[in-house]
Image (cartoon, coloured by chain):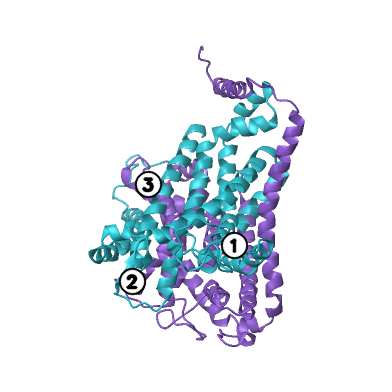
Chain colours: A cyan, B purple
Amino acid sequence: MGRPDPSRPLVAASPRWGERVIQVLLAGCAVISVVTTTVIVISLLTPTLGFFDEVSFGNFFSSDTWAPTGNPASFGVLGVVMGTISTTIWGLLFAIPIGLCSAIYLSEYAKPSVRRVVKPILEILAGIPTVAFGVFAVTFLSPEIGDLFPGFIKTPPFAAGIAGLAIGLLIVPIIASISDDAMRSVPGGLREGAAALGATKLKIATRVTFPAAISGIVASIVLAGSRAVGETMVVLLAAGATPNETFDPGASVLTMTAFIGRTATGDIATGTIAYDTIFAVGALLFVMTLVMNLFAIRLVRRFREVYE
Amino acid sequence: MPRMPGPMAERTRLATAGAHAAVVGNLGRQPRGDVWRGNLFFALLLFAVGLALLGLVALIVQSALKGAPAFSTDLFTEGPSRVNPDQAGFRPAIIGSLYLIAGVVLLIVPLGVGAAIYLEEYADGTRWWNRVIELNIQNLAAVPSIIYGILGLAFFVRGPLDLNFVVAAGSLTLALLVLPTVILAAREAIRAVPSSIREGSLALGATQWQTIRRQVLPASIPGIVTGVILAVSRALGEAAPLLLVGAATFVTADQPNPFEGGYTAMPVQIFNYALQPQDEFRVIAAAGVVVMLIVLLAMNSFAVWLRNRYEQQW
């Protein structure tokens, strides 16, 4: 190689069109995500507006009967929203203590060697398909719990509590993994300072690390809740099909997702008002999870900003 | 407090804050029997971890026990049956799932990696449109899968694309569903490549794209492949959106045409068997769960192993 030719400019004389084209193509790939969201909103909104042309807001939000195919039809969405809230609450009641205890164990107590084994196992188990949890709930949890507590399940094998238990099992890895990340990002100085003043390991874990990581912990719970609200296969198999405005864990309930799944696979003709309810319920589901997701994303960002 | 320079100041500040928190926590009543309490707490933690692992182990063991009577080659060679459990299997479902996954891979690899490259290498993170894209992807990763089913129904099955209930509609829907997973994993892999590699390449006269293609991408391949495998295994196990885009039909066809005719998929077929009232069908459903668990756990283990094995220390 000779010396650089001083008459040759260092900057390329002509714009590199190939580079520009590649950049635009790559940007196009990224924009697909925005397009996806837009398409979701359009595909939910258009039929929902048609739905509200025929059904009043009052009927949708305050009527207490959910019977879209009944005669007369009634569209009190609370009937299915309560079902969703019931299975979600039972799931979270199981998953929060277990998930948080697992997170405290992993971040504060477990030896690195144990961590290296348990953490990937949690990750791998998070990949079990939800239909497997549904089959497990209906072929194992429901008969076993029915034997243990006779009369607990009103309409065997379907019960909100059984579906909740299976959902809880499914979301434990979410809570454990995100909370563990949050607690591990708490700087060691906080723990060392507390230990220097004589705080026990228990006190450090519960009064120093846990409060310091609270935003990440809340985010993990909200994300898990959002996942539980949107869970479909477990509730389709184990929660039942009767709209029921109750939080009784032994009662069969119809959740929003189960309603969408059942109606879409049923014999209802497209273009009817009963068919449009899929989209109205879907829109409500989307809004509920969107609020939860955005809240969780904000919280996660905050703990990243504070400690990283 | 006088300001000290350097990282020691930060450490001191944090230690002081920790000390403060401990003092506040300990003031008032000094604990007695700390050892006893600590051990009890530790036992509680172990109990919780044990319960979570026990639940998951119970799921796997119970599926295996329940499905054991149905394990035979019939499971892979027979089609669905509503009347005769002896002749019920997963053949069309397995073939359908393979077709679906082929479509998903074809879509998510270029789109996911392309988006990740743009966001990590080109995008100016302070611009509002790039922040919108990032927030969007984070939210899409948490949108319920059945909502993607509604999108597929309204846009791919009917509406603009009007494909009807075909494999291609299922692939498109699943691809959109797992795209955020691929993008997030690929971004992390690309971000892990140190900037000195890029600067060195650029200093030697390579263009930005040459730098990405010859330096950044090869270095981040293991992370990207891990992300793709995790995404594919998620798509393979997902049933809810497929219920809405047509995979619920009772299919016996062997070779689905991607753009014509009905199809079914493994998780949907398991769901259909589990819905049947006769216990024999639930046995077949459990056997199907075992087949899926073996495939998915093998895929996920391989992905996690791959990432840990090739995690490069720069």
Compared to residue B68, the image places residue B22 above or below, namely: above
x, y (%) of residue B85? 62, 84
Compared to residue B107, the image places residue B37 above or below, namely: above
Which of label 1 and label 3 is nearer to you? 1
Helix, strand or loop at disc 1? loop
Tell me which amino acid carries mark 2. Answer: Ala
Which of label 1 and label 2 is nearer to you? 2
Q: Chain of mark 2?
A: A
Residue B206 seen in the figure: no
Identified at 35% across, 47% down, the residue is: B132
Mark 3 burial class by Cα count in 10 Å: few <14, some 14-19, many 20+ = some
Identified at 57% across, 47% down, the residue is: A96
Tell me which amino acid carries mark 3. Answer: Ala
Q: How many marks?
A: 3
x, y (%) of residue A220? 52, 46
Task: Give left or right: position of A285 versus B4.
Answer: left
Tag of residue A83: none
Q: Which residue is mark 2?
A: A274
Residue A298 seen in the figure: yes
x, y (%) of residue B100? 48, 73
Residue most extreme to the top: B2
Helix, strand or loop at disc 3? loop
Q: Which residue is mark 1?
A: A128
Q: Which residue is mark 3?
A: B123
Mark 2 burial class by Cα count in 10 Å: few <14, some 14-19, many 20+ = some
Callouts 3 and 2 close, C-beta under 8 Å: no
Q: Chain of mark 3?
A: B
In depth, the one of A194 and B82 nearer the eye is B82
In depth, the one of A221 and B236 nearer the eye is A221
